[in-house]
Image: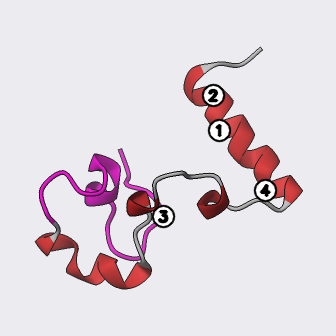
Amino acid sequence: MLDGFAARVMLHEIDHLDGILFPERIDETTLMVPNISMETQSRWPENWPTINARMTPPGMISAER
């Protein structure tokens, strides 16, 4: 049985198999960051949208840790 982060990752991968994309899963659309917004990442309001999005280099899917 999975829980926490591992469960979220598994759900994400199962969603891929079922043809479900991330935008179809989220309730709060303000968490979605359009690609064009990545070009102005340095001017985003503080704490928007998430810390991981702020750390993600433009053109990358997720930040290296």
The residue at 75%/47% (across/down) is 13
Residue contact at pointers 2 and 1, CB within 8 angstroms:
yes
Numbered tag placed on residue 27 in the rendering: none
Above or below, comparing residue 42 to residue 24 in the picture: below
- Identify the amino acid type marked 2: Ala
**Magenta stretch?**
45-65
Q: Which residue is mark 1?
A: 9
* The C terminus, quarter of image: top left
Name the element at disc 3: loop
Question: Nearest the camera: 45 or 58?
Answer: 45
Q: Which residue is mark 2?
A: 6
- The way the protein has been coloured in the rendering is secondary structure
Per the model, the C-alpha gap separating discs 2 and 1 is 5 Å
- Identify the amino acid type marked 1: Val
Per the model, the C-alpha gap separating discs 4 and 2 is 16 Å
The residue at 56%/52% (across/down) is 26
Q: Which residue is mark 4?
A: 16
Q: Which residue is mark 3?
A: 61
Per the model, the C-alpha gap separating discs 4 and 1 is 11 Å
Q: Mark 1 vs mark 3: which is more N-terminal?
A: 1
